[in-house]
């Protein structure tokens, strides 16, 4: 801090990974649902999740702020507290940034990470015959947002479950912890494709398939959802599936790799990963119905979160 720029030294065997993400008041957060500390955590976590999706570990980040002149200094201090808390947990430091006057609170983050060339994850690495692994559960963040916007929703859920869903939205966990489990496969030259599910599980599968020139089948009854989705009367199965596929902001990883490696990965991660589909030849990405139904549905990016 204090100079005009940060100088980053990357070890010779590493490559630099850079990503930028922006959060805008009224689009990505609001004071109705997100505290300043949580805005900071979410902004850091979203960028760290992009590093995880590339197989990279964090170096640090820069923060660009657009702030209304009427905004209190305490809000800004709380924002940086959230950033610091997330970085203390996952690694990386604040390298610098900039601030300017704006009519809308805007938080723009550029994150820098590093990765060995043989440990990179690409969206274009999926091959027919591989299976699809989803880490964690999907739909929890969307349920947490619903609880924040509509507190009367899910009244039959316990306070602990309600708080866990809210935490999933306010304090997402970038899956940097998964990377060490992928290294043995990569060391054997096994192709692993990856992307995070920030815009939804369906969006991630479709984008990987488009980049790899393949199709996929996603098995409806294997999509990992929070157990609480089956416990509440406030959510029917169709809505639960929609939130899991398209809710977004779960910041989990969607990975494609050979079946034997995927089985080993799931075993090592315990209940924290699920094989939920397979990569096939062609270009169609299909949602295959449950064992009680043979219905299929095409998955398309347009059904998920759209930035414009």
Image: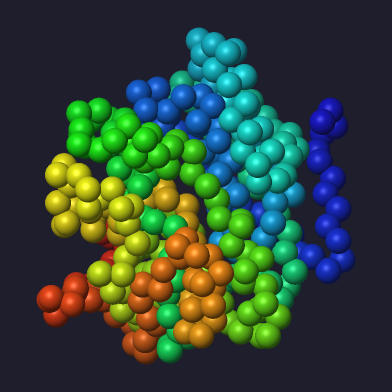
Closer to the camera, 203 or 257?
257
| In this rendering, position of residue 195 left or right of residue 52 | left
Closer to the camera, 254 or 19?
254
161 is higher (above) or lower (below) than 275? above
| In this rendering, position of residue 53 left or right of residue 170 | right
Percent position of residue 182, x then y: 62, 71
Q: Can residue 97 be seen in this view?
A: yes
Q: Is residue 106 visible?
A: no
Please give the name of the residue rendered at 31% of the width and 79% of the height, measured from the top-left corner: 217
Percent position of residue 143, x then y: 30, 43
Please give the name of the residue rendered at 30% of the width and 53% of the height, measured from the top-left corner: 227
129 is higher (above) or lower (below) than 31? below
81 is higher (above) or lower (below) than 146? above
Percent position of residue 5, x then y: 80, 38
Residue 155 sits in quarter = top left
Residue 41 sits in quarter = top right
Please give the name of the residue rendered at 20% of the width and 36% of the height, measured from the top-left corner: 156
Percent position of residue 188, x then y: 68, 85
Closer to the camera, 250 or 153?
153
Task: Point out the image quarter for the N terminus.
Answer: top right
């Amino acid at each position: 801090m204090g100079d005009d720029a940060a100088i980053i030294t990357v070890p010779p065997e590493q490559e630099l990974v850079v990503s930028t993400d922006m959060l805008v008041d009224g689009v990505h957060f609001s004071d109705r649902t997100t505290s300043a500390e949580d805005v900071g955590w979410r902004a850091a976590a979203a960028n760290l999740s992009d590093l995880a999706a590339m197989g990279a570990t964090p170096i640090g980040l820069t923060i660009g702020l657009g702030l209304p002149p009427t905004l209190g200094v305490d809000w800004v201090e709380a924002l940086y507290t959230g950033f610091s808390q997330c970085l203390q947990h996952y690694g990386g430091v604040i390298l610098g940034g900039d601030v300017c006057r704006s009519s809308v609170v805007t938080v723009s983050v550029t994150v820098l990470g590093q990765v060995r060339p043989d440990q990179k994850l690409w969206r274009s690495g999926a091959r027919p015959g591989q299976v699809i692994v989803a880490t964690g559960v999907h739909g929890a963040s969307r349920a947490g947002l619903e609880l924040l916007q509509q507190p009367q929703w899910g009244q039959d859920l316990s306070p602990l479950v309600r708080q866990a869903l809210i935490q999933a939205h306010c304090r997402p966990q970038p899956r940097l912890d998964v990377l060490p489990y992928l290294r043995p496969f990569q060391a054997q030259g096994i192709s692993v494709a990856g992307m995070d599910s920030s815009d939804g599980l369906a969006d991630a599968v479709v984008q990987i398939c488009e980049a790899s020139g393949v199709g996929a089948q996603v098995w409806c009854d294997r999509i990992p959802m929070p157990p609480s989705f089956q416990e509440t009367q406030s959510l029917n199965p169709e809505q639960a599936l929609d939130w899991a596929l398209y809710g977004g902001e779960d910041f989990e990883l969607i990975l494609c790799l050979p079946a034997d490696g995927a089985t080993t990965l799931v075993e090592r991660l315990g209940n924290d990963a699920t094989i939920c589909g397979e990569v096939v030849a062609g270009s169609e990405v299909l949602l295959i119905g449950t064992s009680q139904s043979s219905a299929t549905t095409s998955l398309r990016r347009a059904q998920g979160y759209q930035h414009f």
